[in-house]
Amino acid sequence: MEQEDEKYNPFKRMKKENEIEQLEPHPFSKIKKTVAVISGKGGVGKSMVTSLLAVQLMNQGMKVGILDADVTGPSIAKTFGKNNHRALGDETSILPAETERGLALIGANNLLDDPSAPIIWRGSLISNLVTTLYTTTIFGELDVLLIDMPPGTGDVPLTVFQSLPIDAAVVVSSPQDLVSEVVKKSITMASAMDIKTLGVVMNMAYVKCPDCGKKIRLFGEGNYEERAEKMGSTLLSELPLDPELTSLVDSGLLEEYKGDYLIETVNEIKKL
């Protein structure tokens, strides 16, 4: 029976067979908590959730940084990119880009002269870049470092979970059965690798009628708490489709958002 468990628990087996010493951040970085934002599925809004969490944590007086680990599809730099934030560095260390409000940003697009240039690398090189960004970036003192993960359960999530001191993960989904089935894979992976998951943020949960304020469930009136439980987790927050958020992201001005979406998730992060 034990052999069967090992066979069907590949992440746990990999962790046992390939123990990797956890990496330390740059000596000039003092990071209190590190939270990964994950999902098995692409296009569900991980970067939006990561960005909103950063803004709301800052709104509560916390010092925050974001590491964009989605190397081939980075979007954090654009989200806060009103002034085309660039990181600076040399052979030994990197100073992250910093927004007007002091949000520290580091990712592939903060390093490129042309943000539209593709990064055409194999998985091992991408994973190495993520760990290098973590160990060489001088974040200074942070209350929370958020890691915007790429979709799936491949090289980068495995490397981050094995190598970085992750305190917890926030899972992002959207209310479709197919998405839930794929997102569950990330929750299972995190559990198998002893990563605590705070719960699920259900993105695109509803649209608010501009006239009457009623919540319109575009994907049906299903029970989202029950959906999260079927994925092996609990529901933290619901995030609607909101034209204001889209406009702020497209303008690189998400830092100006003053609403309270995801406040339940923010409160859980603060408890860590």
Image (tube, grey):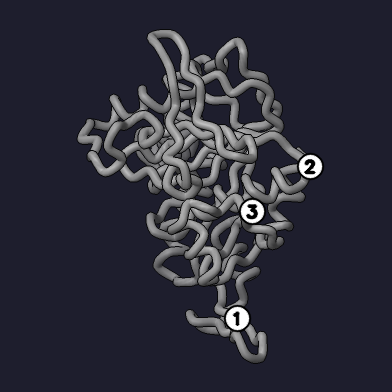
Q: Secondary structure at mark 3?
A: strand
| Residue 172: % across, % down | 53, 56
Mark 3 and mark 1 in contact? Answer it, CB < 8 Å.
no
Residue sitting farthest toward the bottom: 212
Q: CA distance from mark 2 to mark 3?
A: 13 Å
Amino acid type, mark 2: Lys
Q: Which mark is residue 48?
A: none
Q: Nearer the viewer, residue 103 or 176?
A: 103
Residue sitting farthest toward the left: 120
The structure residue drawn at horizontal position 73% and vertical position 48%, both measured from the top left corner, is 59
Q: Crowding near pointer 2: few (<14 within 10 Å), some, many (20+)?
A: few
Q: Secondary structure at mark 1?
A: strand
Badge nearest the viewer, 2 or 1:
1
Q: Which mark is residue 271?
A: 2
Badge nearest the viewer, 3 or 1:
1
| Residue 100: % across, % down | 60, 39
Q: Is residue 194 visible?
A: no
Q: Quadrant of residue 128?
A: top left
User: On the image, numbered disc 3 is attached to which residue?
Assistant: 199
Amino acid type, mark 3: Gly
User: Compared to 248, does 68 lie above or below?
Assistant: above
The structure residue drawn at horizontal position 63% and vertical position 57%, both measured from the top left corner, is 257
Q: Quadrant of residue 132?
A: top left
Q: Crowding near pointer 3: few (<14 within 10 Å), some, many (20+)?
A: many
User: On the image, numbered disc 1 is attached to which residue?
Assistant: 208
Mark 2 and mark 3 in contact? Answer it, CB < 8 Å.
no
The structure residue drawn at horizontal position 55% and vertical position 48%, both measured from the top left corner, is 50
Q: CA distance from mark 3 to mark 1?
A: 24 Å
| Residue 154: % across, % down | 36, 39
Q: Quadrant of residue 207?
A: bottom right
Q: Earlier in the sequence, mark 3 or mark 1?
A: 3
User: Compared to 126, does 221 lie above or below?
Assistant: below
